[in-house]
Amino acid sequence: MTMDESKKPTILIVDDNPNNLVLVNNLLKHDYRIKVANNGQTALRIAGAEEQPDLILLDIMMPEMDGYEVCSRLKADIRLRDIPVIFLTARTSIEDEQHGLELGAVDYITKPISPPVMLARIRTHLKLKASADFLRNKSAYLEQEVQRRMREIVAVQDATIEMMASLAETRDNETGNHIRRTQNYVRVLAEGLRQHPRFANFLTAANIELLFKSAPLHDIGKIGIPDSILLKPGRLDQYEFDVMKTHARLGGEAIAHAERMTGRPVPFLHIAKEIAYSHHEKWDGSGYPQGLRGDAIPISARLMAIADVYDALISSRVYKAPMTHQEAVKIIRAGKSSHFDPDMVDAFLELHEVFHEIATHYADQPETAPLDHTGA
């Protein structure tokens, strides 16, 4: 086959009359590659082959399977439905033509055929098909490109979160495992509360994923705390503790600034800001930095409060050994309705063994134990 021949559009002619096949073939063979079928089953087999025809000329009156049935099956097949079908038939009634077009045919030519008319209509529909194919391919390409770029954006976002969280860890001598533990605690607790009527509207699958991604930034504000306080190897005095507490405000304001710079709402940044700013608030209003009480504390921050306190309790500090899991559970239970949202404590108590599994899986090595000294 020559190069020019390979570029010709392929037309499938379907007719049970050999004379009609020869006639139409002779009219088209110089401009098109021709395939023929003398019955409906053969036509469907040829149309469904790897190299599909670009257009089908289809007779209506054929034994066993008429042209209407062939057209219906073509249009019902997702692989074949975009091949244009032109009925080429001796049936001349308006009703027949209407029925053929309703089945999905693009045109209806009656016999005896007029060669110039048939050739003109074939050229028109091949051009329309080429345009439609281009648009479909372009649309598929654009969809793939959008998905590729979205994956890139998510990867950059994840890398940025990791970088910022790691920076905070470096200054605070926190371990990467603390980050892994707390974000997994938050996700487990959120999943456990998904069906709770107080939280169901917020704890969608999308928001739970955002919570998981946002959790590592809960202490990002510690970057702004002086080393003399942040790295002090012991308990802080009142002045130092007051300075340490400003990390919540610093973190929330830094993320809020990033949120404003985008010029539009960004759900991830909004949740990260809530967690950084409010995860030290307490249910009874005795927390900081705003002294929020009850449901005024964002759900995201309430989840983080339990995760962060539990991890602080079971982690080693320079002035104390880590508590056991059972001791930490007891303290969380005692903080119900004072430090923590009571319904979240109930969920934690149901899930505490999962928390313990996460803590064990991401346990710190002794030589990398954190130097944090306040639980702040």
Image: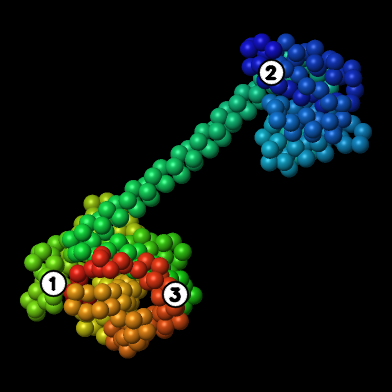
CA separation, marks 2 and 1?
89 Å
The quadrant of the image that shows the C terminus is bottom left
Q: Is residue 253 visible?
A: no
Q: Nearer the viewer, residue 104 or 324?
A: 324
As displayed, is residue 303 above or below residue 220?
below
Q: Which residue is mark 3?
A: 354
Classify 10 Å Cα crowding around label 3: few (below 14), some (14-19), many (20 and above).
some
Q: Nearer the viewer, residue 249 or 61?
A: 249
Q: Position of residue 360 (x, y in %)?
A: 39, 71
Q: Amino acid at mark 1?
A: Pro
Q: In the displayed structure, does residue 63 sit left or right of residue 148?
A: right
As displayed, is residue 159 above or below residue 179?
above
Q: Which residue is mark 1?
A: 233
Q: Amino acid at mark 3?
A: Val
Mark closer to the observer (1, 3): 1
Q: Position of residue 88 (x, y in %)?
A: 80, 26
Q: Earlier in the sequence, mark 1 or mark 3?
A: 1
Residue that appears at 21% across and 59% down: 170
Q: Amino acid at mark 2?
A: Ala
Residue that appears at 69% across and 18% down: 120
For label 1, the SS is loop
Q: Nearer the viewer, residue 353 or 349?
A: 353
For label 3, the SS is helix
For label 2, the SS is helix
The residue positioned farthest toward the right in the image shown: 63
Q: Position of residue 309 (x, y in %)?
A: 29, 77
Q: In the displayed structure, does residue 228 sit left or right of residue 51?
A: left
Q: Earlier in the sequence, mark 2 or mark 1?
A: 2
Q: Which residue is mark 2?
A: 120
The residue positioned farthest toward the bottom in the image shown: 334
> Could you say which quadrant of the image residue 34 lies in?
top right
